[in-house]
Structures are given as structure tokens and as C-alpha cells.
Amino acid sequence: MLLQIENLHARIETKDILKGVNLSIQSGEIHALMGPNGSGKSTLANVLMGHPSYTVTAGRVLFEGKDILEEDPEKRAALGMFLAFQYPVEVPGVTVGKFLKRSVENLRGAEGSLNVNKFIEELRALMDTMGMDRSFINRYLNEGFSGGEKKRMEILQMLLFRPKLAILDETDSGLDIDALRVVAQGVNRLRGDRFSSLIITHYQRILDYIQPDKVHIMMDGRIVLSGGAELVRELEARGYDWIREEVRV
């Protein structure tokens, strides 16, 4: 089992948000997590990556069999976890090229000791795949980027970092159809036995391009319903009210 979440409870300040989340992801699986606003989806993403604003009050998170709740975010990233932010931050003064090379060196260990020319060659090839202008290498990270450019930059990082588990927190939010296809292409490029993803989304459209193995519905801090891709279509047709009635949330 790659990721196993057991009875996870978490709060921010005095507000309980996660109220008993259970979820398992095998290596090679793509899972989608959907739910209404305020259900706890982004909180789950942040807790999994060790955001310091959240306090875990019960439960376990096992990554490849190891409880990671005491590990800092840097350690979790080194283990093979990656989070694509819903709202990527700007980092003035740090160029895209320098940020990415240093990050790759840290994450890949001995393999990360690339010479500059070889790294730039790899980076440019991936930027071409993502439809990104190569001049972005010398721009400050996310500074002055459009929303779509920031999201493409998140996927570019994912392609370079090669995580075992990528958590995509509403990466499709605000994207036009062309940018959405490019983002989905990046995820599908990594798809295989050594890559898994938890895609957090409100919309069916990204799941038209990235076929999930399993779909989960989250409400009031818990996963209340799980199924296959057909669950997304039923949700689009009927909304969340029928789920509330069925599971009595």
C-alpha cells in the first residue's frame, strides 16, 4: 500500500475540519476526491504534506507503511510526496531555473548531481511538452505569471521531481480548455506502476482527460461515498443532495 489514511482527525485553531478520514491508495492508482466547498478536501491535502497550521488530533497516515505524521514537509517530499497548490505562491528573487535545479538535486540524491547543460536540456524538453516559453527559466518563480501559467509550472515541477504520490489540489481551477489539456497531459505522462495521484477537484472536466481508478466524495470532514468513474457522471447529473440523503450527512 502506498498511502493509507486511518481515522484521520485534524483541526485548525479550535475548529475541527477532518472528522475521521479513511482512504487507501495503491501504487499506480489515480484517485479523484470531490465534494462541496468546506468539506475538508484542501485541509486533507495540507495535512498530508505537514502544513504547520493544522493539528492532527487522531488517526494515522502511513506512506509505504511508515507513519509520517511526525515528519516535516521536507522529509515527506524526500519520501516521494508532492503537492500542487491550489494557489501557487510567488517567490521574488528566485529564478525558475535555479529553484528547479536545486530542488531536483535535493530530491534525487546522488542522481540529482546533474551538470548544468544536461539539466537545462531536460528542463527545456519538459517546458516544450507543457507549452511553456523557454524564457520562463530566467523569470522569478510565479512572479507575474497568469493563473494558468502558475498551474503549468506546478505540473512542470511534478514532471521533474518524479514523485511517487502527487496530490493535485484543484489544479484545474480557472484553467481554459487548452491549459486543462496540457495539465492533464503532464499527469498522464507520469502515469504507471510507480506513480499515483490524488486529484482534488470540483469538476468532471479534468477527469475526462485523466481517467480515475477510484472516485471519493467528501462531506463534513469525512469520505462518505466511493466508487468508479461512473460516480462522477452521476454527481454531475444529480448534484450533492442525493448523496446527503443517501448517507444522511
Image: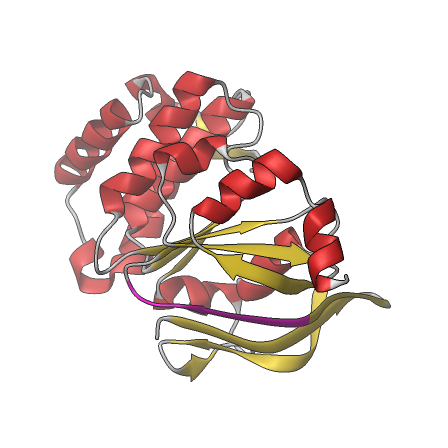
**Picture quadrant of residue 133:** top left
Where residue 26 appears, as percent x and y from the top left, is 34, 67
As drawn, 193 above or below 205: below
Range shown magenta = 20-27
Where residue 234 appears, as percent x and y from the top left, is 55, 42
The answer to whether residue 151 of the structure is visible from this angle is yes
Q: Decide whether the magenta segment is chiefly helix, strand or loop.
A: strand
Foreground: 141 or 232? 232
Using residue 119 as the reference point, say whether residue 206 is left or right of it: right
As drawn, 68 above or below 41: below
Task: State the quadrant of the C terminus.
Answer: bottom right
Is-magenta flag for residue 23? Answer: yes
The answer to whether residue 101 of the structure is visible from this angle is no
**Picture quadrant of residue 201:** top right
As drawn, 69 above or below 207: below
Which residue is pictured at 53% across the width and 62% down the height? 49
